[in-house]
Amino acid sequence: MAHEIEAAAVDSLGAIRSRSSHTLAVGAPCPNCGAVLAGPWCHACGQSAEDFHRSILRLTREAIDGLFDLDGRLWLTLPDLVLRPARLTRSYLDGHRVGQIPPFRLFLIVVVLVFLVGGLGTQKPQNANVDLTLDLGGQRTVFKTEPDMQSVLKDEMVAGRNKGDAWIVARAQAAARDPQRFAAAMTTWAQRLAIFTLPLSAALLGLTFFWRREIYLFDHLIFSMHSLSFQGLLISAVMLGGLATDWSMLGLVAAPTHLFVHLRGTYRIGMFGALWRMIVLFLVSLLALAFAVGGLVMIGLYEVGQ
């Protein structure tokens, strides 16, 4: 599903551009059913009246236009997302949608961006020394790359570890020997699970507004798409900054502040109402993140040991 997310994000970029520059002429036959075309879609079969026979040069130009032009909506959406998130979400919910990127499309693009940026700092030489620390049965154990790993594994087995610890030790050996494969497995599953953050976030929001009958699940989904998109952009910026300085982590302070402002403005609630919801959402998100990371580590260990 990770590749599907990337494909959907790329397709979303391209879909923002107008089709008018490469649609078939009115009056031409539909390539699918032969009906006479009267517009950008066939009235008989519904197929797009798009001419896919285009030169490499034209395809390249359209791809560049899609990435950097986006009909101007990117430059209208991002400033509001960062500085005025409540206005962005409220405008969409109130029906003013033409001037901004669709929330789900924005979310997909940001998901891909996060993993692209995250991959910049994970490249290591194949023969680099890697230490992997695990807490087994209350005792912290550090695993090293070959040849030390063979002796460590033997000592752990002799020490009488149970089967669960032995399973972890064996796969920790494989992960330390091939850290890039371990990281790739975790990244792949993280991309697959990223999409599920939307319904989880919307459901949690719904619980904090369950007595507000005028607010629908749709409202929470749009809020979640915008909020998670900002958090993804923030994480990407922090990771990029981390390549140059250790102080970039301070940028994460903006996460709860942005969430507070976003909540208060979108749902038009008071300071106390926004504050306690922000605290609940943030703490639950941190707890869920801890469980997710632990699960990804176990999945990575399992796949790297196959």
Image (cartoon, rainbow, N blue to C red):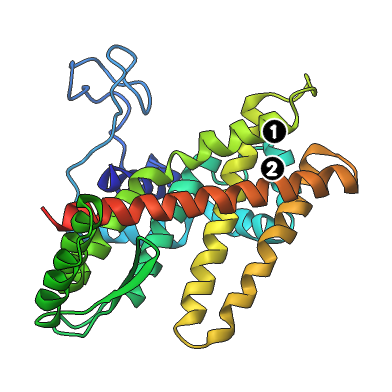
> Which of the 4 image quarters holds residue 223?
top right
* Residue at horizontal 77 percent and vertical 19 percent from the top: 213
Q: Secondary structure at mark 1?
A: helix
Q: Position of residue 51 (x, y in %)?
A: 23, 38
- Say which element carries label 2: helix
Q: Is residue 72 left or right of residue 13?
A: right
In this orientation, does residue 281 appear? yes
Quarter where residue 16 is shown: top left
> What amino acid type is highlighted by mark number 1?
Leu
Q: Is residue 281 above or below residue 123?
A: above
Tag 2 residue: 89
Tag 2: Cα neighbours inside 10 Å, few (<14), some, or many (≥20)?
many
Q: Which residue is found at the position 18% from the left and 52% from the top?
A: 303
Residue 1's quadrant in the figure? Answer: top left
Front residue of 21/177: it is: 177
Asked if disc 2 and disc 1 are in contact, CB closer than 8 Å, the reply is yes
Q: Residue furthest top?
A: 44
The kind of residue tagged 2 is Thr
Q: Nearer the viewer, residue 192 or 13?
A: 192
Q: CA distance from mark 2 to mark 1?
A: 6 Å
Q: Can you give x and y, in whole percent of width and height, for residue 133 in the image?
A: 33, 72
**Which label sits on residue 93?**
1
Q: Does residue 56 appear to the left or right of 21 in the view shown?
A: left
Percent coordinates x, y for residue 167 in the rendering: 19, 54
